[in-house]
Structure formats: C-alpha cells, structure tokens
Image (cartoon, rainbow, N blue to C red):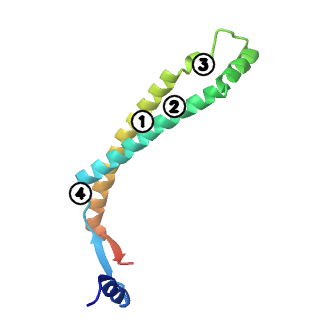
Amino acid sequence: MTSVAEKLQRKSQKPVTTKQVRLKLVYVDFWSAVKLSFLVALSLGIVLIVVTVFLYLALQSFHVFDSIDGLLQDVFGEPDFSVTTELSLVRVALFAVVIAVVNTVIGTVLGAIASLLYNLSVRVTGGLLVGFTNN
C-alpha cells in the first residue's frame, strides 16, 4: 500500500506544462463599472477625510497655527484676526467632507463614461487581447 504522501510526491515529479489562454475583452458591463468606480471613489473620499483631520490635528499639536497668528499680527498689526478661529476643526472637516462628496460623484460619472467609451471603441478596435498563464 502506498501512502498519500508518496502519491503526492510522485505527482510533483511530473513536469508541469505551461498553458496559455488568450481572451478578448469585448464588453464591460456598465453597472459593474459604475459600482466599482463608486466604491473606489468612496474609499478615496474616506481616506481624504481621515488624512485631512489627522493633518489638522498634527499641525495644531505642533502649534503651527499659533505661529502663523503671531506672524500675521507682526506683519499686519491686526490683533482681532486669528487663523485658529477661522480654520477650526469643524470647518476643515466639513470642507473635506464636501470635497469628498464631489470627488465621489465625479469619480462615479467618470467610471460610467469610461465604460461607455470602451464599449463603443470595441466596435472599431475589436477588443483588448488578454493572455493568462497557469504559472
């Protein structure tokens, strides 16, 4: 009787032949492209919001805004203007959210347009040739 390990060892000694498959990408599903572009744009929007808040908190902890306040008071002599009151965390976060929403909408629309343009260009070019191997 042979064990399973011996059978697997004999199988691994056989030479592996490389198989190659060539396919043509002749159609991109519109709704799948829209959903994918929406998810990518949404994730980039979330990253934008998080990075903006962390960057603001880092600049605030390093007292960069206080230094800018002191510089502006020295140059212009206006003691009533303050960068920290104008650029509060709420305003910066709200601005980042607005930009993220706009980027999500634009990214989704661009994904839909790219899908439509590819499907139209396939009629002229015949599609994109893609090759796969089993390596």
Q: CA distance from mark 4 to mark 1?
A: 26 Å
Residue type, label 1 = Ala
The percent coordinates of residue 99 (x first, y second) are 44, 33
Residue type, label 3 = Thr
Under tag 3, what secondary structure?
helix
Q: Nearer the viewer, residue 135 or 84?
A: 135
Under tag 4, what secondary structure?
loop
Q: CA distance from mark 3 to mark 1?
A: 23 Å
Q: CA distance from mark 3 to mark 4?
A: 49 Å
The residue indicated by pointer 1 is 100
- 2 or 3: tag closer to the N-terminus: 2
Residue reaching furthest to the right: 74
Residue 122 as seen in the image, left or right of residue 48:
left
The percent coordinates of residue 81 (x first, y second) are 63, 12
The residue indicated by pointer 4 is 29
Quarter of the picture holding the N terminus: bottom left
The relative height of residue 90 versus residue 126 in the rendered view (above or below) is above
Residue type, label 2 = Val
- 3 or 1: tag closer to the N-terminus: 3
The residue indicated by pointer 2 is 53
Camera-nearest label, 3 or 1: 3
The residue indicated by pointer 3 is 84
Q: Determine the residue positioned at 37% across, 41% down.
A: 42
Q: Determine the residue positioned at 35% across, 75% down.
A: 131
Q: Nearer the viewer, residue 106 or 3?
A: 3
Camera-nearest label, 2 or 3: 2
Q: Determine the residue positioned at 42% across, 31% down.
A: 97
Residue reaching furthest to the top: 80
- 3 or 4: tag closer to the N-terminus: 4
Mark 3, other Cα within 10 Å: few <14 / some 14–19 / many ≥20: some
